[in-house]
Image: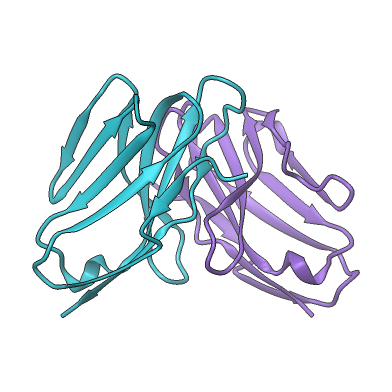
Amino acid sequence: SQQGEEDPQALSIQEGENATMNCSYKTSINNLQWYRQNSGRGLVHLILIRSNEREKHSGRLRVTLDTSKKSSSLLITASRAADTASYFCATASYTGRRALTFGSGTRLQVQP
Amino acid sequence: EAGVAQSPRYKIIEKRQSVAFWCNPISGHATLYWYQQILGQGPKLLIQFQNNGVVDDSQLPKDRFSAERLKGVDSTLKIQPAKLEDSAVYLCASSLISENTEAFFGQGTRLTVV
């Protein structure tokens, strides 16, 4: 079963706009990770946020984590056409299943 | 550093045939994962190894799927016999320590069962 669920399932924006994707999960976690997948390719790690962190930045990426609401958001600022991809959140739990478990993804289309 | 290597990249087989996929993780990585990704869906974990021990195989269909990690390094995933619904991309990933560190993915093997 999927631990994380992303919202929205699909997002289309213009180049230069910001894109926000949300992830909700069910069980307590050690960390939450975001990955990107270009069509037909493997997944690429973007950022990892630990359960005791609330916000993290990496370049144009900003991730927030709210453990009380069991949710996270990924913000991509000043989007580019090259950001077009599917974005997945993945969680590692310390209760129950340890395994790194992925959500269903948000498909982002950035129009040039 | 070299990435996660997977082979073959593509495979087409008939239903009821068997198939095997191979994965060579990044050197020194203790954790190895096999995921199944059906088109339009997120990766679904099949099995997670820590060195050569199994951490989680709760979603591995054990009547037809098997996996092993030789000497805690390379891994093979086998399907026997294959069904039409096994058509998917099979992704291998590795991480240095555990599920609490970033995972590096291979390019995947696209399996088509006809």
Quadrant in the rendering for residue B37: bottom right
How many badges with numbers are in the image? 0
Residue A48 left/right relative to A2: left
Q: Quadrant of the N terminus of chain B?
A: top left
Image coordinates for residue A68, horizontal then vertical, percent: 34, 24
Chain B tint in image: purple
Residue B2 visible: no
The chain shown in cyan is which?
A
Please state which of residues B25 and A21 is positioned toward the viewer in this rendering.
A21
The quadrant where residue A55 appears: top left
Q: Where in the figure is residue B19, as x and y percent of width and height? A: 80, 63
Residue occupying image coordinates x 20% and y 73%? A81
Is residue A6 found left or right of B83 in the rendered image? Answer: left
Instruction: Determine the residue positioned at 32% across, 48% down.
Output: A22
Q: Quadrant of the C terminus of chain B?
A: bottom right
- Residue A97, image x, y percentages: 61, 28
Q: Looking at the image, can residue B91 be seen?
A: yes
Give the x, y percent position of residue A35.
37, 50
